[in-house]
Image (spheres, rainbow, N blue to C red):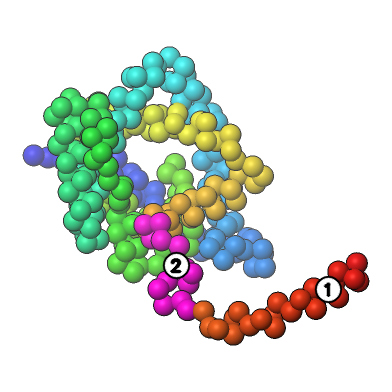
Amino acid sequence: MVVKQTGFLFRALVALAAVAMLAGCAGRVAVEDRHPDDPWEGFNRRVFSFNEAIDRAVLKPVARGYRTVTPEPVQTGIGNFFSNLGEIRTALNSLLQGKPANAGLSTSRFLINTTVGIGGLWDFATPMGITAEEEDFGQTLGAWGVGEGPYLVLPFLGPSTVRDTSGLPLDMYTYPLTYVEDDKVRIGLTALRVVDIRAGLLDQEELIRGDRYVFIRDAYLQRRRFEVSDGELGDDPFASDDFEFDDSDFDDADFDDSALDEAGSAD
């Protein structure tokens, strides 16, 4: 079977072109003004402005029209369909990260929703309590100890990091739409998926305050770090069994009544 790779090749070339242009553009932002996670801010802001222009002119109006004319149950079914296809990627990456339980849950979701849910249009797994954490190759690289690298805005694709960009080819290879042979069907489904995702972000967009570039960058980095760490925020000494109080910490001298009386009389 000959697999059509047009979409993958285009996106890969875009990513490579973006990285190649960084050296000439990164220096346009003063060194003292650069965010430590965003040393290529000059380049990133230019790509961000380009993406925003495309979004305002094409994608956002289409997403608004889609949400207006498409009944909510249909929108839910479309979202379920594309989400179900992503379960395959989640299962594979869960195994690569040493999370067999999550891989089993994701596989179960795919089998149940594909069969009982008629191709994934209905999500029967969630009401049954079968839920799994989404995983991708960017998260897998993070779990393997690969640093996230600088923040990077890709043309058309939006926020990313060097690590997440490295995982894009494998993410595309493990998404079933890549293997649809009919170009019209594959492109049509991909376009529908993009519009559906954009429509789902319309309400969240109202939460953006201040500098849109900074808000989106910080939100993206925070979310990805949360996903890579599986929500772990570090060790809390107060939650550790090894945390012990010393008797001196409760010395009566620290609570001398006379000191309190003196403070009261001073008032």
| First along the sequence among labels 1 and 2 | 2
Residue under numbered circle 1: 261
Q: Where is residue 53 in the image (x, y as percent from the top left)?
A: 56, 36
Query: Depth check: 213 or 243 in front?
Result: 243
Q: Name the residue under label 2.
A: 239
Q: How crowded is mark 1: few (under 14 residues within 10 Å), some or many (20 or more)?
A: few
Is residue 219 visible in this depiction of the protein? yes
Vertical comparison of 9 with 126: above or below: below
- Label 1 element class: helix
Residue positioned 14% across, 37% down in the render = 111
Amino acid of disc 2: Ala
Q: Residue furthest right?
A: 266
Quarter of the rendering containing residue 209? top right
Q: In which quarter of the image is the N terminus?
A: top left
Where, quadrant-wise, is the C terminus in this rendering? bottom right
Q: Which region is colored magenta? A: 229-244
Q: How far apart are marks 1 and 2 (CA)?
A: 36 Å
Q: Residue furthest left?
A: 1
Give the crowd class for mark 2: few <14, some 14-19, many >=20 residues within 10 Å: few
Task: Please report the residue visible at 44 percent of the width from the left and 67 percent of the height from the top.
Answer: 239
Say which mark, if any, is on residue 127. none
Tell me: 210 left or right of 2: right
